[in-house]
Image (cartoon, rainbow, N blue to C red):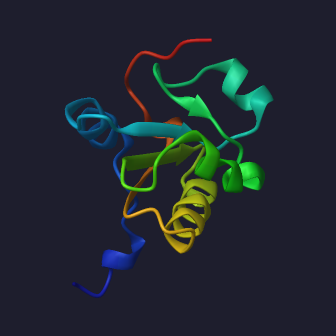
């Protein structure tokens, strides 16, 4: 790990591609409902970061879980919380503000 590696942010475009290529994966948009309704990655599930504990009732802990938000900060917090809850494969893919793909409302 280089000196400036901590400054790198996840690539949401690569992350969405990984999500699509991962069998039985889940993609959580951890923004608010209002933000989600303005436009989100297709096939994502809105689960605001403040409600992340509900993930335990939505998906099994052994499934691959991807998280994203607006810039990557909330999805990083959500990913940490999911790991602490016992989810085994959690990937923060960053912020939708850097997403080049199609969105839906």
Asked if residue 50 is positioned above or below residue 58 in the image, the reply reads: below
Q: Residue placed at 38% from the left, 42% from the top?
A: 12
At which x and y percent is residue 93? 41, 49
Quarter holding the N terminus is bottom left
Task: Please give the name of the residue rendered at 42% of the width and 47% of the height, measured from the top-left corner.
Answer: 66
Q: What is the quadrant of residue 20 in the picture?
A: top left
Q: In the shown orientation, is residue 104 left or right of residue 88?
A: right
44, 96: nearer the viewer: 44
Q: Residue at x 67, y 53 (%)?
A: 52
Please identify the residue farthest to the bottom as the structure is shown.
Answer: 3
Q: Say which of 41 and 1 sits in front.
A: 41
Quarter of image, res 35:
top right
Residue 37 spot, x, y in % from top left: 71, 20
Residue 96: image location, x then y, percent? 51, 37
Residue displayed at 40% across by 60% down: 9
Residue furthest to the top: 105
Q: Nearer the viewer, residue 81 or 40?
A: 81
Whether residue 96 is situated above or below residue 6 in the rendered picture: above
Q: Position of residue 84 (x, y in %)?
A: 55, 74
Q: Quadrant of residue 98?
A: top left
Q: Which of the two residues, 35 or 59, is positioned nearer the viewer here?
A: 59
Of the 4 image quadrants, the one containing the C terminus is top right
Total of numbered circles in the picture? 0
């Amino acid at each position: 790990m280089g000196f400036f590696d901590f400054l790198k942010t996840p690539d949401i475009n690569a992350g969405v591609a990984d999500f699509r290529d991962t069998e039985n994966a889940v993609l959580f948009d951890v923004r608010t409902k209002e933000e989600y309704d303005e436009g989100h990655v297709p096939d994502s599930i809105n689960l605001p970061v403040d409600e992340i504990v509900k993930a335990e009732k939505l998906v099994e802990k052994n499934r691959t879980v991807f998280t994203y938000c607006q810039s990557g900060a909330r999805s990083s917090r959500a990913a940490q919380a999911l790991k602490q809850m016992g989810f085994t494969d959690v990937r923060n893919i960053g912020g939708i503000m850097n997403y080049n793909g199609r969105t839906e409302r």
